[in-house]
Image: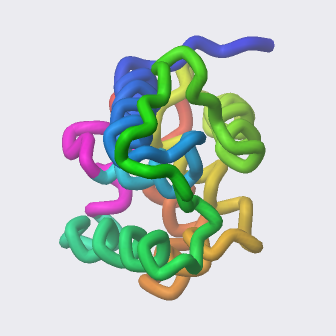
Amino acid sequence: MKMPFGDDLKSVIALSRESAIKFGYPMIGIDNLLLEVIGLEKGSGATVLSKLLGDLNKVAEKIRNHRDTGLLEQSNGLSEEVVIPENSLVLTADAEVAVHGASEEAMKHGSAMVDSCHLVLSILRMSEQPVVQALVDMGVTYKGVSNCLKPGRTDQ
């Protein structure tokens, strides 16, 4: 069953695309998605992460540090003169798995639509990813995020 994406998830994906283009990344990775979840302060994903961690700026900084030090596989390798057409920018394989997995999380939690909190849950299932390890190191776990969501609630 295909579930509709909520406005906050649509915004996260659109902002991730814009951010990747701005910084010259050839693809949208899970780090781009998470940074935009955090940046969308009124979104369900940021709300849940804020409940667990308080200051989301620290989380964003840790994700950026991992990416910038090469611990994340998101590197552009492009010169500043390269212009990436918006329609050619795609999700990395992991980001695509995360977005599709968000639908499963929404169904599992009894939500009527897929929101950014479901994307966070989906990403947290990817335990082998360095960005997920960074979150876990800060105390963000699948169970913790899941416990913040109430079944059937669509306004997280």
Which residue is located at x 73 percent, y 49 percent?
Answer: 94
Placement of 72 over or under 122, stated as above or below: below
Q: Estimate the x, y position of residue 69 in percent, counting from the top left.
A: 47, 81
The residue at 49%/46% (across/down) is 25
Where's the N terminus, which quadrant?
Answer: top right
Reply yes or no: does residue 48 show up in magenta. yes
Is residue 40 positioned above or below 133 on the image? above
**Would you identify the image quadrant in which residue 75 lies?**
bottom right
Q: Return the x and y of residue 5 as percentages of the image width and height.
A: 52, 18
Q: Give the range drawn in magenta.
A: 39-50
**Can residue 16 be seen at all in this image of the molecule?**
no
Answer with the quarter of the image where residue 11 lies: top left
Compared to residue 154, the image places residue 42 above or below, namely below
Q: Which of 115 and 80 is in front in this view?
A: 80
Nearer to me, 89 or 57 = 89
Residue 141, image x, y percentages: 56, 72
Q: Does the magenta stretch include residue 62?
A: no
In this picture, residue 80 sits left or right of residue 75: left
Residue placed at 21% from the left, 39% from the top?
42
- Quadrant of image for the C terminus: top left
Residue at 59% across, 70% down = 72
Tag count? 0
Q: Is residue 96 rendered to the left or right of residue 42?
A: right
Asked whether residue 123 is in view, the answer is: yes
